[in-house]
Image (cartoon, rainbow, N blue to C red):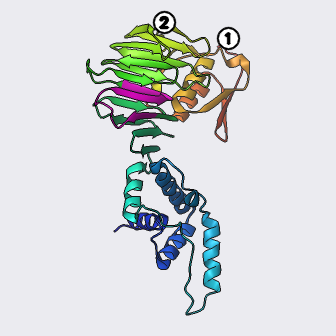
């Protein structure tokens, strides 16, 4: 058994209330060795909680530092014959084997994604990385960061309905008998077989749909009869406040840059470039002075890092870019004479 497997087993037995005193001491000694170990314990604890879709008050209240302090005090005050008793979570119905199975099923380390399961539905959550996954019907989804998708355990049996929060690109398998329906809140997107992008990240509740191929029908939950048909190259924006859908030709060549990491700028203004980079790389870039927002750039970037693109901007437009924490600040002079 590898060290990682061993500690997963110890964590699982501890959460299940089945660890003995020797195992508890070994677990807490390992946690104290490194901050990363402590974080790993907390991540697995969170995964266990999420797998049940409820938070066990006793487990969520575990304070590692307090427990370790208590353990040390008990050791210091113990005698040869004294039995050390460190409080564990009260044993529940789940065994250690069930706990470790749940953790393995719901938590994938290093990929920024949680697969959350309960008896009724499956939820796919992308945190800090883009996630690609095949749905039970064979459809492919690319889920942007800070987004989540949920579908019923009965998906593809009678219907194909998913709930989306955030942004995703869909490649839907053709099945005219089971239309693919995406709920984004007030708006529904219905397809038979096509590729398209849905952006429901707006804090205002607006939803953007761009069709790459095929046909999509969109409508509000309250009025299916007033639907709008979208074809390849079309873009529609649903305004939550006005309850209307505005359809246009899509002119944003970079609408999928968050997925492809390919960026095309043709005499693009710096203010628009910054907006695109922030969306593509989930970054926070700001312009320090308004005189540079109209500076233009023509260039194509293909799977380049944000830092390398900023270096090109800095050199080409004679800008100054400084990073302060997680924020990139761009300053410079007007570009009219360059």
Residue 63: x and y in percent read 62, 63
User: For residue 35, which quarter of the picture?
Assistant: bottom right
Secondary element type, mark 2: strand
In this rendering, position of residue 91 left or right of residue 243: left
Query: To which residue does mark 2 refer?
Result: 248
Look at the image and say whether residue 171 sits in the magenta stretch: no
* Mark 2 surroundings: few (<14), some (14-19) or many (≥20) residues within 10 A: few
Residue 69: x and y in percent read 65, 73
Mark linked to residue 336: 1
Q: Is residue 248 above or below residue 184?
A: above
Secondary element type, mark 1: loop
User: Which residue occupies 47% across, 63% down?
Assistant: 92
Q: Is residue 73 above or below residue 67?
A: below
Please tell me which of labels 2 and 1 falls first in the chain.
2
The one of 212 and 72 positioned closer to us in this rendering: 72
User: Which residue occupies 57% across, 31% down?
Assistant: 311
Residue 279: x and y in percent read 54, 27
Look at the image and say whether residue 152 sits in the magenta stretch: yes
* Mark 1 surroundings: few (<14), some (14-19) or many (≥20) residues within 10 A: few
The one of 236 and 227 positioned closer to us in this rendering: 227
Q: Quadrant of the C terminus?
A: top right
- Write down the region rendered in magenta: 149-170
Considering every residue shown, the one lying at the far bottom of the view is 80
């Amino acid at each position: 058994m590898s060290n990682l497997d061993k500690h997963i087993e110890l964590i699982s037995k501890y959460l299940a209330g089945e660890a003995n005193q020797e195992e508890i001491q070994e677990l807490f000694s390992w946690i104290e060795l490194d901050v990363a170990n402590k974080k790993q314990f907390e991540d697995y604890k969170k995964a266990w909680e999420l797998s049940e879709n409820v938070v066990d008050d006793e487990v969520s209240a575990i304070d590692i530092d307090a427990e370790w302090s208590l353990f040390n005090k008990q050791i210091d005050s113990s005698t040869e014959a004294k039995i050390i008793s460190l409080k564990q979570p009260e044993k529940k119905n789940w065994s250690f084997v069930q706990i470790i199975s749940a953790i393995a099923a719901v938590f994938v380390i290093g990929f920024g994604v949680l697969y959350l399961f309960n008896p009724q539905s499956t939820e796919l959550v992308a945190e800090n990385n883009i996630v690609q996954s095949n749905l039970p019907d064979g459809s492919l989804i690319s889920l942007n960061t800070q987004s989540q998708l949920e579908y019923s355990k009965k998906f593809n049996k009678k219907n194909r309905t998913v709930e989306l929060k955030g942004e995703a690109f869909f490649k839907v398998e053709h099945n005219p008998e089971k239309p693919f329906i995406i709920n984004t809140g007030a708006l529904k997107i219905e397809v038979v077989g096509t590729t398209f992008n849905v952006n429901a990240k707006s804090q205002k509740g607006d939803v953007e749909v761009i069709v790459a191929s095929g046909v999509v029908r969109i409508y509000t939950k309250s009025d299916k009869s007033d639907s709008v048909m979208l074809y390849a190259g079309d873009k529609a924006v649903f305004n939550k406040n006005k309850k209307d859908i505005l359809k246009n030709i899509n002119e944003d060549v970079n609408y999928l840059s968050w997925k492809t990491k390919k960026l095309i700028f043709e005499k693009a203004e710096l203010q628009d470039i910054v907006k695109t980079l922030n969306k593509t790389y989930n970054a926070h870039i700001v312009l320090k002075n308004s005189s540079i927002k109209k500076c233009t750039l023509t260039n194509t970037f293909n799977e380049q890092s944000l830092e390398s693109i900023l270096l090109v901007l800095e050199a080409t437009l004679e800008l100054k870019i400084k990073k302060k924490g997680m924020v990139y600040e761009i300053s410079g002079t007007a570009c009219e004479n360059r």
